């Protein structure tokens, strides 16, 4: 039982790292909390759901489609909202409220269009087989999701450390002002990063069916809070740190579900509050705020 | 200052008279009750958000805590309703005291931690393991003390109290010290303001008002579920009403609630998502074009808004 | 030297930021009624010293006595109530409030003594801001915002002020005006530590200067002696 819990926790943890990483990327670049993050995850899930049920497209292929769709969405949203927000008197707070409004709009549009029902993609989409580690059997879909998560992390790492754009993104994360004077096209790079953040959210959404059972239009707020707990746990503003946060969260939730299941829905909230109060700089890395 | 106080007091008096006599000529009492409820909550939120800048995204947590504290006082301690309403306010105040460390967090961090706290409270209250105390997910029935008229006027008293508190803050040195904290915490403390204490008082008052409101609501509807009184929508609606009117004044949250809740009721509530959509768009438009609410149009023209 | 008339006495003050020691055992004291100049290169710990003494930063070690009482790790508002206040190098006005309201907060909460209106008026007139008292603080020039910071500090009835680089970025005329203002305030009995880059400005105010470097006090004496001190010259000219 213990061994099973640990293994499942690691797989879930990597998935939850994927859930949070987009939020952390956007926070790192713009110092804004995308409160609609969970709703973009939901949009990714609905995209996958419709493509699967209407055209039989395998969720793995949806990744490619969502890269195009959400990059476009992200860049558009960035140029509509962010430059104006950055000029306002309190960008941090106003962006928080604005993205909350956006989250309400997205949720309402999806409910009005498709109804407030749970949607799912059959868990045997990737085959009926299971796989086993040390004698513990898991559904094959978990393995697929784990591999997807790891590949995504490697891709994000590659983007940061081996592409020009990623290098500029890191420069902006270190100091927006200095990047501006050093000739980086801050708006273009940030818009792209915003798009990548949304792509990452959508990929987490595509695989939500296999890790969370079902997707529904109002799942967003909850996922945003969970994502925020994860990125605070890891390290705010440090996307790669999200993986650590995800793993801690995954293990914690698995242990709660195994040994204290009736209280497990409290976990993300208590974890979030506890970390913010006692270890606001995250479990790794340095603090990013002076309060 | 005195003139301003009298003027503001006049507004409170007019609002009170309207809600005292309107039920005699307008028979949709539940609309009037909810209107008072939202004004009181918007003013309560205004105390902490408008004067100190802390946005309590989990404001509904106090509302739910008030509803449950009052209900438990009625059901288990067999307290009379009015005393139980007060207990409701105290229950929310207690939650406020427990959450006080959150005030160490700044800006959006505070908002999101407060949101998490209200959700945690909801999951605790709704947990089936606590059925013997909170009735878990099955909700509360106060049928034995059901009294729509008495609870209506109790809500009116809470509304008046909330506006008087905001009036006091708006026109007192205490309010000035809160604004100083909002502008710059360090400068305020070097002006001699005990920042932690002033913030805590505003926070406590804000929680107390929400608790009284939740308790009055519980008495008025007399049957409710944890999801009813801990619904994030309540936080959302109240924040939108306050922002729309403009925070930091008595008139802003009042005007915002009057306009938007009338509008809400006018269209009807058959498909709540249309309002969610509308509110969402309204939030975005407000943040981008009118971040200080509609009353700021007057303030920009140097007209005093009470 | 008797300890009785020391207004501020700081011993072995330590402040760490992570692994970096911004203050590494600074010993600085001022006698009642005097002005002490505090000089030193950028990063030598002058501003940190003010931040720690005024309670804005919490120290990591040492002793701080103000008027005979320990103010070590005391909260800023309590230190203000004891009669010690400060100004900022980069002014931190209450931007959305008027000039008068800015000073009023300090007059009401900074000290119980005296009539609020009188305190506001005298603070504003001693920094010559009475003519703009209904303006919003954010609309003032940077120099005026510095003066507003000084007015807020004065409205709390201070016995002592810590003045942080008030002359930076001002022109000759403004410099002279501020120097006169500080001298006048000192004559009224306010003890001061004036942190300053410009030796010429300090020279007008006082003949008692401490030079800091790397978080400790390196030298104390007159400005003339400082200019002849090898270590001081080395620190200022770089090595």
Image: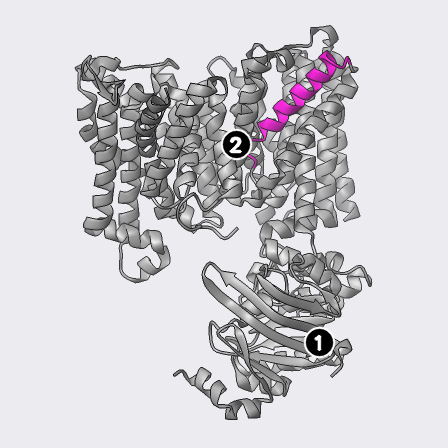
The chain letter for the residue carrying disc 1 is C
Please rate how many residues cluster around mark 2, counting C-alpha atoms within 10 Å: few if below 14, some from 14 to 19, many from 20: many
User: In terms of image quadrants, where is residue C224?
Assistant: bottom right
Q: Residue at x 52, y 36 (%)?
A: A273
Magenta range: B56-78
| Label 1 crowd (10 A; few <14 / some 14-19 / many >=20) | many
Q: Is residue A73 left or right of residue A220?
A: left
| Residue B65 highlighted magenta (yes or no) | yes
Real-space CA distance between mark 1 and mark 2, rounded to the nearest whole angstrom: 48 Å
Q: Are marks 1 and 2 on the same chain?
A: no
Output the chain of dot 2.
B
Name the secondary structure under disc 2.
Answer: helix
Name the residue nearer the viewer: B301 or A69. A69
Point 70% across, 19% down: residue: B70
The front one of C236 and B27 is C236
- Chief secondary structure of the magenta portion: helix
**Residue, far top:** B144
Residue wearing tag 2: B115
């Amino acid at each position: 039982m213990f061994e099973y819990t640990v293994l499942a926790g690691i797989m879930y943890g990597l998935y939850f790292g994927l859930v949070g990483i987009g939020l952390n990327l956007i926070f790192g670049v713009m110092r804004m909390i995308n409160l609609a993050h969970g709703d973009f995850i939901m949009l990714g899930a609905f995209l996958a759901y419709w493509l699967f049920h209407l055209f039989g497209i395998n969720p793995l292929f949806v990744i490619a489609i969502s890269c195009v769709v959400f990059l476009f969405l992200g860049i558009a949203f960035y140029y509509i909202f962010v430059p104006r927000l950055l000029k306002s008197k309190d960008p941090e707070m106003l962006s928080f409220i604005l993205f909350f409004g956006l989250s309400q709009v997205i949720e309402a549009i999806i409910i009005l269009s498709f109804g407030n029902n749970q949607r799912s993609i059959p868990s045997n989409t990737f085959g009926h087989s299971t796989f086993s580690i040390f004698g513990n059997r898991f559904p094959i879909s978990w393995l697929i999701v784990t591999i997807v998560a790891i590949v995504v992390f490697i891709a994000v790492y590659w983007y940061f450390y081996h592409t020009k754009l990623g290098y500029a993104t890191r420069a902006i994360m270190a100091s927006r002002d200095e990047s501006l004077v050093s000739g980086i096209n801050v708006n273009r790079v940030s818009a792209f990063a915003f798009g990548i953040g949304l792509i990452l959210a959508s990929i987490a959404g595509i695989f939500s069916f296999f890790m969370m059972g079902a997707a529904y239009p109002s799942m967003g707020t909850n996922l945003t809070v969970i994502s925020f707990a994860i990125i605070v746990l890891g390290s705010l503003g440090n996307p790669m740190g999200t993986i650590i946060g995800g793993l801690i969260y995954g293990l914690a939730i698995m242990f709660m579900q195994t040994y204290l299941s009736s209280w497990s829905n409290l976990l993300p909230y208590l974890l979030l509050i506890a970390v913010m109060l006692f270890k606001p700089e995250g479990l790794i890395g340095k603090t990013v705020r002076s309060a | 200052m005195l003139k301003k106080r009298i003027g503001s007091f006049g507004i409170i008096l007019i609002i009170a008279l309207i809600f005292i006599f309107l039920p005699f000529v307008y028979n949709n009492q539940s609309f009037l009750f909810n209107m008072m409820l939202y004004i009181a909550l918007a003013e309560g939120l205004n105390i902490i958000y408008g004067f100190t800048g802390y946005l309590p995204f989990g404001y509904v947590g106090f509302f739910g805590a008030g509803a449950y504290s009052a209900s438990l006082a009625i059901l288990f301690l067999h307290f009379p309703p009015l005393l139980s309403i007060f207990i409701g306010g105290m229950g929310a105040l207690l939650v406020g005291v427990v959450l006080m460390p959150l005030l160490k967090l700044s800006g959006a961090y505070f908002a999101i931690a407060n949101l998490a706290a209200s959700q945690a409270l909801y999951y605790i209250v709704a947990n089936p393991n606590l059925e013997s105390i909170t009735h878990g997910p099955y909700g509360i029935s106060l049928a034995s003390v059901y009294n729509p008229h008495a609870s209506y006027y109790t809500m009116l008293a809470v509304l008046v109290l909330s506006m008087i508190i905001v009036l006091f803050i708006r026109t007192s040195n205490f309010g000035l010290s809160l604004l100083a904290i909002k502008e710059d915490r360090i400068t305020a403390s070097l002006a001699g303001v005990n920042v932690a204490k002033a913030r805590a008082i505003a926070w406590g008052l804000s929680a107390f008002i929400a608790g009284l409101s939740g308790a009055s609501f519980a008495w008025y509807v007399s049957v409710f579920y944890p999801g009813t009184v801990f619904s994030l929508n309540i936080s959302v609606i109240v924040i939108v009403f306050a922002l729309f009117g403009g925070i930091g004044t008595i008139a802003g949250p009042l005007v915002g609630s009057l306009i938007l809740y009338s509008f809400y009721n006018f269209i009807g509530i058959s498909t709540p998502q249309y309002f969610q959509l509308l509110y969402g768009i309204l939030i975005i438009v407000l943040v981008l074009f009118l971040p200080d609410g509609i009353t700021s149009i007057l303030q920009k023209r140097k007209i005093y808004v009470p | 030297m008797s300890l009785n008339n020391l207004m501020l006495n700081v011993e072995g003050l330590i402040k760490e930021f992570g692994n970096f020691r911004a203050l590494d055992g600074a010993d600085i004291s001022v006698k009642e009624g005097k002005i002490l100049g505090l000089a030193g290169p950028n990063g030598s710990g002058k501003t940190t010293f003010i931040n720690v003494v005024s309670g804005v930063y919490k120290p990591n070690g040492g002793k701080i006595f103000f008027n005979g009482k320990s103010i070590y790790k005391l909260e800023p508002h309590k230190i203000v109530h004891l009669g010690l206040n400060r100004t900022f190098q980069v002014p931190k006005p209450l931007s959305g409030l008027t000039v008068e309201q800015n000073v009023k907060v300090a007059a009401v909460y900074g000290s119980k003594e005296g009539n609020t209106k009188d305190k506001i008026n005298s603070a504003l007139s001693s920094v010559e801001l009475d003519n703009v008292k209904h303006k919003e603080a954010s609309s003032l020039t940077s120099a005026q915002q510095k003066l507003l910071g000084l007015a807020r500090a004065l409205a709390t009835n201070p016995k002592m002020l810590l003045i942080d680089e008030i002359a930076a970025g001002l022109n000759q005329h403004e410099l002279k005006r501020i120097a006169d203002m500080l001298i006048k305030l000192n004559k009224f009995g306010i003890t001061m530590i004036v942190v300053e880059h410009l030796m010429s400005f300090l020279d007008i105010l006082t003949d008692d200067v401490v030079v800091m470097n790397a978080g400790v006090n390196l030298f104390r004496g007159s400005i003339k002696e400082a200019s002849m001190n090898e270590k001081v010259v080395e620190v200022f000219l770089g090595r």
